[in-house]
Amino acid sequence: MSANFAIVGSGPSGMYAAGALLDMVPDCRIDVIDRMPAPFGLIRFGVAPDHYKMKNTARQFARTFELDAVRYLGNVEIGRDLSMIELRQNYDAVVLAIGSYNDANLGIPGEDLAGVYGACEFVGWYNAHPDYRDLDPCLDGPGVAIIGIGNVALDVSRVLVKTRAEMTDSDICAHAMDAIEAAPLKDVHIFGRRGPVEAGFTPKELAEMIDFEQCASIVDAAQLPAAVEGEFEGRIKGVKEKNLAILKEIAGQDMPDKPVRAHVQFYASPVEILGDGKVDAIRLERTEVIDGRAVATGETFDVACSTVITAIGYYSDPPEGVPLDRNVIDNKDGRVEDNVYVVGWSKRGPSGTIPTNGPDSKAVVELLVEDIAEFGKPGGDVIDGLLKERNVRVVNYDDFKTINEAEVANAIDGHHQEKFTRIAEMLAVLD
Ligand SMILES: Cc1cc2nc3c(=O)[nH]c(=O)nc-3n(C[C@H](O)[C@H](O)[C@H](O)COP(=O)(O)OP(=O)(O)OC[C@H]3O[C@@H](n4cnc5c(N)ncnc54)[C@H](O)[C@@H]3O)c2cc1C
């Protein structure tokens, strides 16, 4: 009797888990279920459009869907179309790989003003995530403040300051490119509570700030230490040293005469967003870093802006019946409860790159294989029946390939593809 597994979520962690199950359980059958008609999670909806090569990682995962043992059940949401109980009853094990892509709050006054967005919303908007198609972000003033000093903050700032020509090698959606190009943007401010050494940037992404067509990057040399001090593991220290060298290069540049500026400011913690119904400015408090922690100094300053984008962390939003522990699914080394496991960002929280999820998913699958003594639940057939009864339009992998071909055919401006931004548009290609 073959083993039947359900993986909820087709992002990197779910796809690595599928690969590990195929390696470790002979003759198993796997249903990878995702609420989106298009698979691969943040590879499609998170990775910056101008980092298109990074999206090629999806190719290795696409090969998994070509196997007879693996099915893609796209456009199926657990918690809406199927319940966790139904999955647990019908599969030998359920692996949750639902990510943690919901914006954490700043928790400061003014956060509800029009013009304040979380990075998930804003990134989803320019990356064609159907949930954010109608975000229509306010980009009507010269200033944008981005809160956070990690790669997502850099992604957002790059997409805002690059010209249409610089975005040729991308898959940014037309509606976002048009809105950004039309915006009267002059100053993008990236603010971090802590210092350059604590920043979560990676050198490759930071180095892209050195040279933009129409934007000069600005860093205050006075905020940069002479060297990276402190106890860091060798590789991490190397990354921090490279970052510091890049920041020094930016700080040392003669200020290029360009119409847009991207300012990176450390030691600045947002305390209030100001405005009457809509953002006018952000108030920040100077900090100093003591033992790696930002400590407020009491000195505040205001920066005019009409848009605030927060990139400060994310939390998981599991379907009913799955316990949450702060921002992740409650688990012990990936075990959630009997025959339920969790991998990826919904297990560890929102950190790490696509490949980081590989060893993590493999380790959880090893536990799963150790735990499950008997296989024999019915798997997909019962689930197919339930979905049919509920009139759910399941998008399989061949359907997705059809959608993808249409997106490639619709490409404009030399882009790689023009992604559909609404689920109905994707389904219309099939029906
Ligand atoms: C903005 C951004 C840019 C990034 N850029 C890079 C980069 O350039 N390079 C890099 O290596 N890493 C990058 N990362 C990190 C990388 O995206 C993550 O490491 C990785 O996506 C985490 O994988 P995951 O499978 O845990 O979650 P996700 O990729 O978020 O996948 C979760 C999947 O679960 C599905 N899902 C959620 N809830 C349900 C439900 N109830 N029912 C069915 N399906 C559900 C979602 O639709 C989604 O497809 C970036 C992350 C972000 C946020």
Image (tube, grey):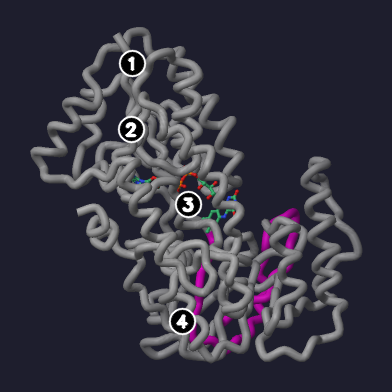
Amino acid at dot 4: Asp
Q: Are marks 3 and 1 in contact (CB under 8 Å)?
A: no
Tag 3: Cα neighbours inside 10 Å, few (<14), some, or many (≥20)? some
Q: Distance between the residues labelled 1 and 2?
A: 14 Å
Discs 3/2, front: 2
Tag 1: Cα neighbours inside 10 Å, few (<14), some, or many (≥20)? many
**For disc 3, does the CB lie below 8 Å from ligand 1?**
yes
Discs 3/4, front: 4
Q: In this view, does 427 lie above or below 368?
A: below
Q: Are marks 3 and 4 in contact (CB under 8 Å)?
A: no
Q: Which mark is residue 321?
A: none
Q: Mark 3 highlights which residue?
A: 42
Quarter of the image where the C terminus is located: bottom left
Please give the range of residues in magenta.
283-312
Q: Mark 4 highlights which residue?
A: 178
Label 2 SS: strand
Discs 4/1, front: 4
Q: Which residue is drawn at 19% across and 25% down?
A: 381
Q: Residue at x 52, y 42 (%)?
A: 59
Amino acid at dot 3: Leu
Residue projecting furthest to the left: 389
Q: Residue at x 58, y 71 (%)?
A: 168
Quarter of the image where the N terminus is located: top left
